[in-house]
């Protein structure tokens, strides 16, 4: 698939809008952990980046799990005695308990109530509920609508199939100069929920597109997978290859207005953990860092003890910590192009640190070399700019002993990695540094 370069097709100011438009296109699709909704979603992503679509048959053993039967739905409704649709799947795909078994029948209100989910604390919102591994049927509706149901007979229909098929996921590999990999993972199983996780899909797609147009030190692997069972399946199929993964991020909840939040990898002090924290610290914005816990998104599968991959999760407001989470209020009004653009920029900054984090050796280690005669001292902008540049040069010279990385130096000097990286580049060009190999 030939794609125009982002620099030509989408301006930096417009990339947030492009991400938002992708979310808007994907919003109406009913997705689940399997089924045609996932396939339709992946085909739309292919219009942004050329992901490869994989199918894994139902019944495939994946560690302690098994790929489930495939679920697809065409229609669902609750009709009152007058034949009026009170609940209509085509109005909102959240109205159906996700993975509901097929069902048709008539019943009274007392029996129907046992199959209805609402949010009394938010009476105008529809909750999102699932039943992947327990075969049952149900509906979700606003509590206000629920309270208006009369004691009469209702016609109930869930026109769905749950039968052997496959689990579908997308993958894109962007080769770099090395075979060491950075994994970027997002889940594609949620239906009409914009922040969780259409925002993650959009960011991953456009981050991949940006990286496809740049020189790369690392190989980047993007996976668009159903949550939990998708990552378990992918890990089972790639068990012998995951040793190549040196860094990784799980993308979710990146479109709301909350502060950026980083959940550390299981390792806690991996290079990805330090890189993200460094970027957040020097971003000038409020942020939060959380320790790893074995609950959340797919970082808990990548960080299971048998793999222990250095993969964290960079979000805005974390899952479960905003009222709109897993409700119909997580809609197109809850996310913004501005927030998406800033989140993408933060991901790019983190990857820039990983790409450029190297170790150097000072080739003139006995006392400070004379920098003035090499043109490295002198006015650069204002006094503050000159001092910042000089301090970066001195720190890089002093700590480039072959052991410290540029990120080590930036953290110890409390300077932005960007300044340390530029100082190292200037010193290398003057013959005062050499990059350590291996």
Image (spheres, rainbow, N blue to C red):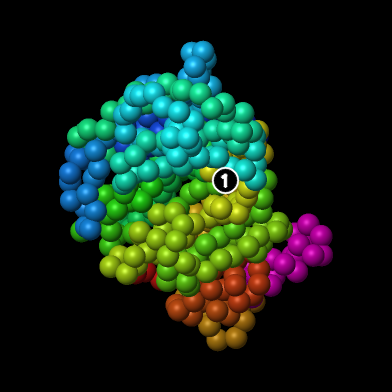
Q: Quadrant of the C terminus?
A: bottom left
State the residue in front, 357 or 164. 164
Per the rendered image, the range of residues in magenta is 374-395
Q: Is 1 placed left or right of 194 in the picture?
A: left
Q: Quadrant of the N terminus?
A: top left
Q: Is 17 placed left or right of 293 in the picture?
A: right
Name the spot of residue 405 as percent of width and height, x first.
49, 72
Residue 142 in magenta stretch:
no
Name the spot of residue 242 as percent of width and height, x first.
28, 58
State the residue in front, 77 or 340. 77
Name the spot of residue 55 as percent of width and height, x first.
23, 37
**Residue 3 versus residue 412 in the image, above or below:** above
Quadrant in which residue 340 is drawn: top right
**Residue 23 versus residue 200 in the image, above or below:** above
User: Mark 1: which secondary structure?
Assistant: loop
Residue displayed at 59% across by 42% down: 119
Residue displayed at 61% across by 28% down: 148
Q: Which residue is mark 1?
A: 325
């Amino acid at each position: 698939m030939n794609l125009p370069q982002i620099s030509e097709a989408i301006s930096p100011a417009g990339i947030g809008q492009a991400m938002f438009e992708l979310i808007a296109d994907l919003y109406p699709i009913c997705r689940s952990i399997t089924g045609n909704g996932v396939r339709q979603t992946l085909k739309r992503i292919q219009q942004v980046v050329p992901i490869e679509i994989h199918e894994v048959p139902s019944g495939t053993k994946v560690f302690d799990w098994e790929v489930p039967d495939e679920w697809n739905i065409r229609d669902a409704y609750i009709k009152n005695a007058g034949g009026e649709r009170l609940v209509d799947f085509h109005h909102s795909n959240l109205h159906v308990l996700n993975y509901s078994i097929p069902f048709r029948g008539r019943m009274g209100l007392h029996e129907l109530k046992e199959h209805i989910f609402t949010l009394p604390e938010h009476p105008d919102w529809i909750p999102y509920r699932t039943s992947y591994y327990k075969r049952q049927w149900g509906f979700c509706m606003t509590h206000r609508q629920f309270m208006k149901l009369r004691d009469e007979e209702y016609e109930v229909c869930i026109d769905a199939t749950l039968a052997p098929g496959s689990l579908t996921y997308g993958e894109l590999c962007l080769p770099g100069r090395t075979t060491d990999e950075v994994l970027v993972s997002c889940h594609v199983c949620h239906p009409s929920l914009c922040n969780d996780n259409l925002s993650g899909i959009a960011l991953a797609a456009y981050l991949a597109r940006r990286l496809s147009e740049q020189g790369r030190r690392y190989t980047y692997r993007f996976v668009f997978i159903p949550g939990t069972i998708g990552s378990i399946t992918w890990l089972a199929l790639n068990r012998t290859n995951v040793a190549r993964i040196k860094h990784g991020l799980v993308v979710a909840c990146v479109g709301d207005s909350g502060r950026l939040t980083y959940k550390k990898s299981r390792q806690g002090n991996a290079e990805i953990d330090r890189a993200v924290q460094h970027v957040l610290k020097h971003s000038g914005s409020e942020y939060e860092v959380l320790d790893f816990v074995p609950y959340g998104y797919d970082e808990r599968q990548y960080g299971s003890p048998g793999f222990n991959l250095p993969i964290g999760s960079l979000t805005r407001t974390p899952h479960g910590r905003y009222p709109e989470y897993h409700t119909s209020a997580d809609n197109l009004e809850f996310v913004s192009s501005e927030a998406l653009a800033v989140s993408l920029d933060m991901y790019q900054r983190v990857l820039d640190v990983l790409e450029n984090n190297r170790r150097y050796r000072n080739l003139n280690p006995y006392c400070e070399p004379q920098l003035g005669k090499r043109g490295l001292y002198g006015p650069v902008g204002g006094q503050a700019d000159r001092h910042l540049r000089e301090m970066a040069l001195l720190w890089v010279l002093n700590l480039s002993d072959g052991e410290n990385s540029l990120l080590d130096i930036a953290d110890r000097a409390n300077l932005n990695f960007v300044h340390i990286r530029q100082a190292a580049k200037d010193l290398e060009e003057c013959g005062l540094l050499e990059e350590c190999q291996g």
